[in-house]
Image (cartoon, helix red, strand yellow):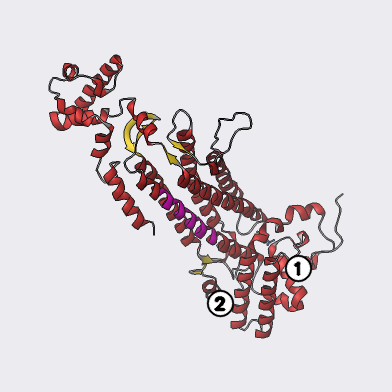
Amino acid sequence: MTDKKTKANTLWGGRFEGGVSDIMEKINASIDFDKILYRQDIKGSIEHCKMLVTTDIISSEDGIAIQNGLRQIEGEIDAGDFEFSAALEDIHMNIEARLTEIIGSTAGRLHTARSRNDQVATDFKLWVRDACDQADEALKALQFVLINKAEENADVIIPGFTHLQNAQPVTFGHHLMAYFEMFTRDRARFADARKRLNECPLGAAALAGTSFPIDRHQTAKALGFDRPTYNSMDSVSDRDFALEFLSAASISAIHVSRLAEEMVMWSCAQFKFIQMSDSFTTGSSIMPQKRNPDAAELCRGKSGRIIGSLNSLLITMKGLVLTFSKDMQEDKEVTFDAVETYSLIIAAMTGMVEDMKVNADHMKKATEVGFITATDLADWVVRVLGLPFRNAHHITGSLVALAEKKGCDLDGLTLEEMQQVEPKITKEVFNVLSVESSVGSRVSFGGTAPSEVLKQVALAKERIG
Ligand code: ARG
């Protein structure tokens, strides 16, 4: 029924009479996406080869020929001078086939005491390890930008929301530093994932280890791993490292998404808290007045894609018997896509935060509604009049109702009106009703007072590492 190829695969086709069908080639081949692993694959092969020489499993002449051939191949791929073949399935077999072309049958000695199963696990771990390092660098750059913006805006007042209702006034610097904290945790998650992944699967061979006298400690060390993995079966069936990377990236992406959503909201005509730069916005083809926050919207949108990658791999891995199953080849596209998408949204967010112009007047204006200093009033009643907080809450509620009826803010009530609700109130109460005094008073560690924000900014500069 299907169009059969006539020749069996030269690398594994010893027991096969015919070749695979076109459809089989299409479903089986991963070269279109896993060629991205070529540097890791060559590095792993070179260290494996060196180890085979030091353990006398292959001769040093063969070792030199293999290593030179591999370096030549790396040069060819770097230069875009390499012809990838889907018939050779994946990056591992493409490279080995080319090595055979260059140095002849000696190339076949490289695969001694190794299988594609431990090879791909090693390559992929090396790649994900680099991705952790890149994520860390990118997040650090974003954190620097946040710190600077926070410092510039340490005393700019905005409404702080709960339930998207004006809750208490806060400083914009404080708000931005909240994201600094999220990205600090994200970096810790990537660092943690990196630490746990740093065991080398190479030498686990297909699944059971090998009878050759290999030195797994040598290859692990040479490839920058802390140690070899402890169990050969786990080595080739584990993809936790990719899942952990994707989990960390997903959590971080939702932080980016939340900030992006806030920026979309802050930049709309009703808020006008910020203006985003030309570099990260677009105009409308029909409405000339528009400035659309596309980059922010796409940061928000693309976070879904990263979470999708995590879901995809979780579902792929669930229910697989030990050890390797070809399903696991599906680990790569989603991870590669997530890494590219993640690095793009972090870079875009860094640029957007750096460029955003803050409109302090509009921010302040937005605090002048919704009785935003009601908590300060209640706290004053507790502090000065010595009433329990619950009573103070009740009194303040009555004052809010009174102000609402009168159509003014809390400081629009007269002292007499206040005293009708609670006779012991004095004119000193008016000192706590301004948003400036409200934020200025919140000097508890991690609080929103400008002085505390500046302290946190200074601490952040030390913590950032
Ligand atoms: N290309 C495969 C992957 O991406 C690795 C090969 C292991 N395959 C095998 N048939 N044992 O996971």
Residue displayed at 79% across by 66% down: 13
Can you tell me whether the CB of the residue at mark 2 lies under 8 Å from the nearest atom of ligand 1? Answer: no
List x then y, in percent, for residue 26: 76, 53
Part of the protein shown in magenta: 130-146
- Could you tell which of marks 1 and 2 lies nearer the N-terminus? 1
Is residue 388 visible in the rendered image? The answer is: no
Residue closest to the far front: 288
> Where the C terminus falls, by quadrant?
bottom left
**Depth order, front residue of 435/418:** 435
Q: How crowded is mark 2: few (under 14 residues within 10 Å), some or many (20 or more)?
A: some
Question: In this figure, which residue is indicated by the disc labeled 2?
Answer: 215
Residue displayed at 47% across by 33% down: 265
Question: In this figure, which residue is indicated by the disc labeled 1?
Answer: 11
- Name the side, left or right, on which 335 lies relative to 270: right
Q: How crowded is mark 1: few (under 14 residues within 10 Å), some or many (20 or more)?
A: few
Name the kind of residue labelled 2 in the image: Asp
Is residue 164 visible in the rendered image? The answer is: yes
